[in-house]
Amino acid sequence: MSLETAAPSWRTRYDAQVADLRRQLAGLPGDKPLRLAKKTSNLFRPRADSPVDRLDVSAFDGVLHVDPHTQTAEVLGMTTYEHLVQATLPYGLMPLCVPQLKTITLGGAVTGLGIESASFRSGLPHESVIEMDILTGDGEVLTVSPAEDDPHRDLFFAFANSYGSLGYALRLKIELEQTKPFVHLRHLRFDTAEELTRVLKEISGSHEYGGQRVDFLDGTVFSPSEQCLTLGEMVGRLPDGLTLSDYTGMNIFYRSIQNKREDVLTIHDYLWRWDTDWFWCSRAFGTQKPAIRKWWPKSKLRSDFYWKLIALDRKYKIAARTDVVRKRPAREQVVQDIEVPADRLPEFLDFFHREVGIEPIWVCPLKQRDPNARWPLYEFDAQTLYVNVGFWSTVPLPEGVDPEEGRVNRRIEEVVSALDGRKSLYSTAFYDRETFWSIYGGDAYERFKKEYDPNGRLLGLYEKVVERQ
């Protein structure tokens, strides 16, 4: 067999893993819905405590191969971005979009969407996938791609935002891009949302500001009158007059945005700048207080540890019981990411400050990379620049209002729809079926579901994300 036709060295091991997984699936009773047995999750919606068959996919965390010549990687579907970046950075490469938290998996970001500060030029994670192997509900493993002659091309495009309801990605071949050792940051301040939006749109179109290239772009809204854009440029050496910053210990990244005009991080530390404090959510655990932070183990300053604390609170309702004892109002969890057209961003922020009041707020521009592609379960106007708005906290409720009603979350859904926007589905959703399917692929989804999960082995999308089954 010639070198040209020989199977790559990783293929034998991968094929054995797939065979083991299919045997495991065949051995499950099959009378209950199928769900992955995963150690980590970045979903912020509670699930009903109902019987399910658990599929152990722990073996599918790892990078099979990095090809520095083609700038691609073969990656197992349950690989965390932390492990993916560890494998690619030594080659001076990284994924085109690296979501902010270390334990987000590649398969999860593709089927459940992900975003980061390169999305204004590189789109979302699913847009840099070249090929996937998908395990469907009936146990078949299909290799899918966007190629015109691929018989399962429709599954490739329907996979984004399907949340495992059409299958699970076992292997993904993805594009990579070249990196440089450092990221030079510039923090721009604005008094109004209108001015921030104007500059955000200009940079998203030109990929430069003040004559300097912009590789990364996101923003932080601290209040209606204190708003910042952070511009990042990958550079080969430290800029004159600047020293490396470290936000993995006592210093807190989002606070530096308020205090510095310029900054510089290693590319590794830039990619994980938000993970140390889970953006700013670590303050709920007191870890931003110097007296506590000094003694907090550095290894526990990371999002997955905070998530474990949240899980404990959910299980034992610690915060809710404490509020009752202290006679505080009940609080509704408002943990969401939404996208609105950039032109509508000031309207959304005005509503949000007035009716919700959570601060800070994260903003991140995105635009579909290929204007000719159609992703039916999360369809954008391909010519329009959108802005993701992320907000993660709780809000106090009037006396007698049950947090489970989702009063604030329902209002956000209503406003986002009125502004021609979309809402990510990793957290709670309250749409009725008709409204939900009018936004998230309706008739197309039903066709895909019948074709790729004819026996209903996998929970449906609405059942997963709204009914929380």
Image: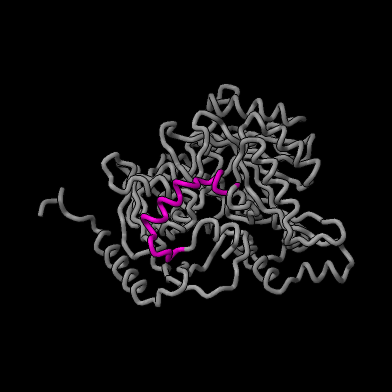
The residues colored magenta run 435-458
Q: Position of residue 436 (x, y in %)?
A: 58, 49
Judging depth in this view, the residue of 60 and 145 nearest the camera is: 145
The residue that appears at 34% across and 69% down in the rendered structure is 21
Could you tell whether 427 is left or right of 412 in the image? left
Q: Quadrant of residue 195?
A: top right
Judging depth in this view, the residue of 328 and 246 nearest the camera is: 328
Q: Quadrant of residue 29?
A: bottom left
Q: Is residue 221 above or below residue 447?
A: above
Q: Is residue 206 visible?
A: yes
Tell me the quarter of the image containing the N terminus: bottom left
Q: Is 238 colored magenta in this rendering?
A: no
Judging depth in this view, the residue of 214 and 131 nearest the camera is: 131
Could you tell whether 217 is left or right of 415 in the image? left
The residue that appears at 47% across and 67% down in the rendered structure is 35
The residue that appears at 44% across and 54% down in the rendered structure is 84
Q: Is residue 50 above or below residue 343?
A: below
Q: Is 443 colored magenta in this rendering?
A: yes
The residue that appears at 82% across and 62% down in the rendered structure is 330
Tell me the quarter of the image containing the C terminus: bottom right
Q: Quadrant of residue 26?
A: bottom left
Q: Is residue 63 visible?
A: no
Residue occupying the far right of the picture: 327
Q: Position of residue 183 (x, y in %)?
A: 55, 39
